[in-house]
Image (cartoon, rainbow, N blue to C red):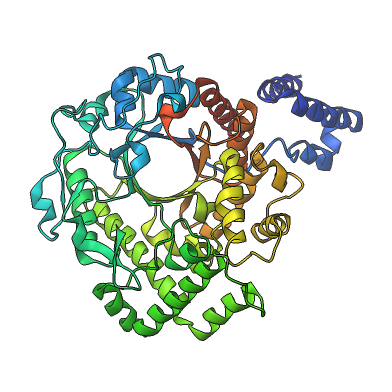
């Protein structure tokens, strides 16, 4: 009798956490079990727990890691306590990643039509009205670099507030972690930034900083040392949303010439056994070839892609230089990681991987596995924004490749190759005609998470960035957000990062995340 009572209780709990479709499948399996005799049918009993809707993979029986990306002015405007209560109640958030430095342009505020209207206060446009830097810096940490953080105007709203000190107590009261986040961007808030700008193949200065430049590296090391010595931070996430020189030629975000060939990169190349002049010549010729492809000039008789390969074959320095570009960035990561760990070993330090390398930059994937990044990565957070990925694939991938090295293919052919190379199910994902109207499916989140977890090979945690309410996206559906969140966990993610920006997120969509998180937690306890 006791066994029957316990079994009945188990059935009730299971049915509560399942949706209607899954309940029907579960009850069908249950009927088979009862008809065959529960105790005498171990294989059928096992089938009860192998339904695709119920994943019982081996994870720790603790609250799932649920982080959110946050702009400081959002929290201050809504009220620290009220804001933390909202994200915890709706999305079950326990890690708050707030921008400490808004170096990246889109972190400064949103137009009113991009802001969520249901957070309890009227939407406000904060663009150009709030500081770019939200922590207090100390000059002694920047003695090894000529770079400095510019002081914010005292006239800006919230310029007198010290959010990363103010939020510690209310966050601790709610068992939430306080973490800082930075996206590398322009030098708008950095003094002497011109000293560290990249140098292109024509000897001209670029708009970004060179990762090999010692002043730039010392700047980041000093910045995180200052922060972790003066603030009670539990974690840190850093990201740089820019492509390497090869991808910016063949899948151009802009028309900038390839970088970097400054004195520090030239010295680095020589140390790696690469001829800098050959690398520069190869990049210049490939850049000029692709620029011709984008013009009305006749296409080469041998084929567009064939000539592209010819440059790679004749100038192997192109790929070697690209790899040095990537490893230089990883050394910036390692410098910050080592600096933070010396100050606070328990801090969780990881990296933001934006949508291009997370979803379509095959060069980035080929350069390095996540396992190779693991020695200086407590986690790697990937942008897996399923809805907005579709229009981005159309305009940022298909259309750009169509104007360069894949101009001999139709958009349909190019999209099919993309699905095949990256292992996405083309029967579930949008066709070319649907890309501007329909987002990618939750199955994309599952597949990309699973691939990334395999790439990490157990050496570091993979955090899935679940994105919604992103401008330019097809309309978000709470049910698909719920499914995408579950799929991230089913794919093996160690946690999720609710993305892109809190101020854009509608409450029903935050609630969809929370529903999935609580269901996943309930599954783990069964």
Which corner quadrant of the image does residue 142 belong to? bottom left
Whether residue 422 sits left or right of residue 289 in the image: it is right
Residue plotted at (30% across, 73% down): 265
Q: If the image is split into quadrants, where does the C terminus sit?
A: top right
Q: Nearer the viewer, residue 498 or 420?
A: 420
Q: If the image is split into quadrants, where does the N terminus sit?
A: top right
All told, the count of numbered labels is: 0
Residue plotted at (13% across, 30% down): 154
Which corner quadrant of the image does residue 362 belong to? bottom right
Q: Is residue 124 above or below residue 53?
A: above
Q: Nearer the viewer, residue 332 or 321?
A: 321
Residue 298 seen in the figure: yes
Q: Is residue 280 above or below residue 488?
A: below
Residue plotted at (43% across, 25% down): 115
Image coordinates of residue 191 in percent, x first then y, are 16, 51
Q: Nearer the viewer, residue 252 or 68?
A: 252
Image coordinates of residue 224 in percent, x first then y, are 23, 49
């Amino acid at each position: 009798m006791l066994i029957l009572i316990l079994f009945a209780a188990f059935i009730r709990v299971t049915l509560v956490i399942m949706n209607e479709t899954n309940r029907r499948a579960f009850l069908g399996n249950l009927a088979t079990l009862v008809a065959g005799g529960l105790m005498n049918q171990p294989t059928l009993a096992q089938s009860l727990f192998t339904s695709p809707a119920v994943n019982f993979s081996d994870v720790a029986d603790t609250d799932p890691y649920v982080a959110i990306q946050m702009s400081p002015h959002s929290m201050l405007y809504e009220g620290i306590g009220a804001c933390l209560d909202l994200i915890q109640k709706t999305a079950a958030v326990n890690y708050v990643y707030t921008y400490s430095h808004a170096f990246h342009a889109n972190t400064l505020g949103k137009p009113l039509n991009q802001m969520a209207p249901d957070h309890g206060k009227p939407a406000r446009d904060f663009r150009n009205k709030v500081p770019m830097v939200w922590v207090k810096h100390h000059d002694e940490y920047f003695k090894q670099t000529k770079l400095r953080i510019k002081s914010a105007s005292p006239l800006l709203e919230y310029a007198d507030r010290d959010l990363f000190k103010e939020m510690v107590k209310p966050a601790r009261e709610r068992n939430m972690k306080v973490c800082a986040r930075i996206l590398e961007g322009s030098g708008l808030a950095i003094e002497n930034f011109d000293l560290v700008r990249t140098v292109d193949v024509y000897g001209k200065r670029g708009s970004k900083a060179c990762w090999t430049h010692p002043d730039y590296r010392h700047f980041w090391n000093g910045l995180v040392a200052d922060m972790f010595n003066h603030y009670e931070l539990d974690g840190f996430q850093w990201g740089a949303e820019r492509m390497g020189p090869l991808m910016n030629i063949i899948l151009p975000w802009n028309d900038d010439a390839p970088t970097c060939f400054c004195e520090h990169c030239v010295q680095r190349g020589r140390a790696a056994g690469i001829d800098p002049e050959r690398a520069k010549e190869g990049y210049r010729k490939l850049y000029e070839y692709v620029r011709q492809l984008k013009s009305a000039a006749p296409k080469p008789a041998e084929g567009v892609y064939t000539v592209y390969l010819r440059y790679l074959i004749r100038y192997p320095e192109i790929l070697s230089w690209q790899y040095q570009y990537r490893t230089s960035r990883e050394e910036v990561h390692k410098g910050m990681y080592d600096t933070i760990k010396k100050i606070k070993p328990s801090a969780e330090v990881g990296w933001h991987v934006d949508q291009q390398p997370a979803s379509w930059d095959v060069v980035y994937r080929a350069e390095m596995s996540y396992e190779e990044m693991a020695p200086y990565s407590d986690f790697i957070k990937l942008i897996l924004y399923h809805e907005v990925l579709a229009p981005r694939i159309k305009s940022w991938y298909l259309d750009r490749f169509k104007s360069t090295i894949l101009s001999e293919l139709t958009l349909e052919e190019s999209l099919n190759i993309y699905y095949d190379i990256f292992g996405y199910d083309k029967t579930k994902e949008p066709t070319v005609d649907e890309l501007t109207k329909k987002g990618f499916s939750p199955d994309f989140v599952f597949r990309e998470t699973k691939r990334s977890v395999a790439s990490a090979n157990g050496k570091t945690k993979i955090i899935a960035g679940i994105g919604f309410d992103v401008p330019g996206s097809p309309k978000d559906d709470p049910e698909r957000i719920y499914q995408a969140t579950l799929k991230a966990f089913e794919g093996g993610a160690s946690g999720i990062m609710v993305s892109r920006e809190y101020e854009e997120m509608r409450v029903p969509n935050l609630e969809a995340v929370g529903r999935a998180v609580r269901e996943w937690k309930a599954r783990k306890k069964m």
